[in-house]
Image: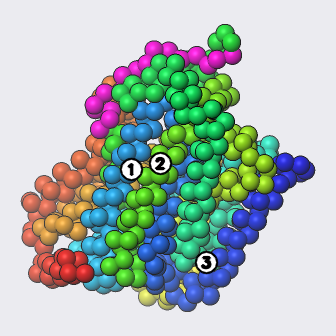
Amino acid sequence: MMGDTGQIFIAMMLYMAVVIGIGVYYHKRAGESSENYLIGGRSLGPWITAMGAEASDMSGWLLMGLPGVAYWYGLSDAIWTAIGLLIGTYLNWLFVSKRLRNYTVIANDSITIPDFFSNRFKENKKVLMTIAALFILIFFTVYAASCLVTVGKLFSTLFDVKYQYMMIAGAVFVVCYTYVGGFLAESASDFMQGVVMFFSLLVVLIGGVSAAGGISVVMENVRQIPGFFEFFGIAQPVLTEGVQQIGEGGQPLFGDAAPYGLLTVISTLSWGLGYFGMPQVLLKFMAIKNPQQLKMSRRIATIWCAISLLAAVSIGIIGRALYPGALLTQSSSESIFILLATSFFIPIIAGVVMAGILAATISSSDSYLLIAASAFSKNIFHGMLKKDASDKTILYCTRATLIVIAICAMIIALDENSVIFTVVSFAWAGFGATFGPIMLFSLFWKRVTRAGAIAGMLSGGGMVFFWELVLTPMGGIFSIYELFPAFVTSSLFILIVSMLSKVPGADVLKEFEAARRISLGS
């Protein structure tokens, strides 16, 4: 490996060495207890809480998936998704963060999301906890697979090495440092990775605008594509077997713009609903040392999110103006960030920018693997199978489960034609519909019951699968994003079943009021 590619490789390897160093640094503290390994002993500061939550949430999807959507379909789908995510981010920090942080301490010091739900409803038979843990295992395995697709595409594009080899190498790296350092390493590195992602997006955005000759030139070029630069229209690439066709003059062909109606806008905005059920974000709320610092975290997270999302969408638009016929499949369009970065900058700087994608991937995949592993070890193994297991045994089980989940994710990610945006959207809908409604009801409605919680989880998670696999292929109204109908379904089941079932016990109501008073007073 020589020349430009070698310099890019060196820059990225130096970055990976820093991440490994963070894992080694936190190894001793992580191994002291399962609480330290899984939630860091509730010791995070406001900056790490904010940046860690956003970096682990956005993942490589922010630098590859979202720009790819903008490059392929134009402004509407990408910008409405970004707006929905920004609104959801702010509301989640505003309403959920403080109440959840205080409630998890009161509810028997819960350190995982399934723990919280189980303790919140004082269940003896851990049915609710088991259901929550199983859904986490399923959806986070899919989520982790999307991260491995990202790292596989990144390295195979840069170094012209077979995708599968690069995907597996990335998976091994992530597993190694997460295995060693646990939640503290993951959170500390997420802070650094959030900074790198932010820097990379801004640098590529500025470089793209400069190379295109200014914003006005970009807009003039893309407006020539039907529906490309519209809020209520969407571009339609002319495809043959999934490949966009090229017309005279070497320009890619587009058909007439398709409408982007109000129902589609609502559907796309519903991405924001997913935040209320995202375990990787909710755990950061739970792990902050001082709940009073969550206001600062909210401001940091919202500003980071707003700028990053706008930059990601803009990069896709600029990429279509600069390289209109370079990426001719939806899967390959997700490499537009890589194409721009390697075209604008000297190799060593390009390597640092490429580390932004690596940062995004690592910051998410480590969270996904760790939370999924903890769901099994803490909530199924310890909660159901071996209740007398020692803390060290739980820790060993967590690490072993982490490896197994990573292997399953690698199997899912073997297909190099996977579209990152599609994989992420399914897992996002799964978490949003399974945990989002019951999280909100649990925190803000004391009348919600354990039966209602179970019904809400099962109906929300089940509807995601049913809508995506059965109804979406029918088209028409059924083509809306599955999160919206599944979220509504889950909420209705929670409300109806709770009203039909017995009022929660006095101890449950007492804890609810205690959490409410603390949150209002803190």
Q: Whole-percent x and y of residue 313?
A: 50, 41
* Residue 510 image-quadrant placement: bottom left
Magenta highlight range: 250-266
The answer to if 252 sits in the magenta stretch is yes
Q: Of label 3 and label 1, which has the lower sequence position?
A: 1
Q: Whole-percent x and y of residue 387?
A: 41, 84
Question: Looking at the image, do the residues carrying marks 3 and 1 touch, with CB atoms under 8 Å apart?
Answer: no
> Callout 2: few (<14), some (14-19), or many (20+) C-alpha neighbours within 10 Å?
many
Q: Nearer the viewer, residue 2 or 307?
A: 307
> Callout 3: few (<14), some (14-19), or many (20+) C-alpha neighbours within 10 Å?
many
Which secondary structure lies at badge 2?
helix
Which secondary structure lies at badge 3?
helix
Residues at marks 3 and 2, CA–CA distance in whole angstroms = 29 Å
Q: Residue at x 71, y 57 (%)?
A: 352
Question: Which residue in the protein does label 1 denote?
Answer: 85
Q: Of label 2 and label 1, which has the lower sequence position?
A: 1
Q: Residue at x 9, y 59 (%)?
A: 500
Q: Is residue 48 left or right of residue 515?
A: right
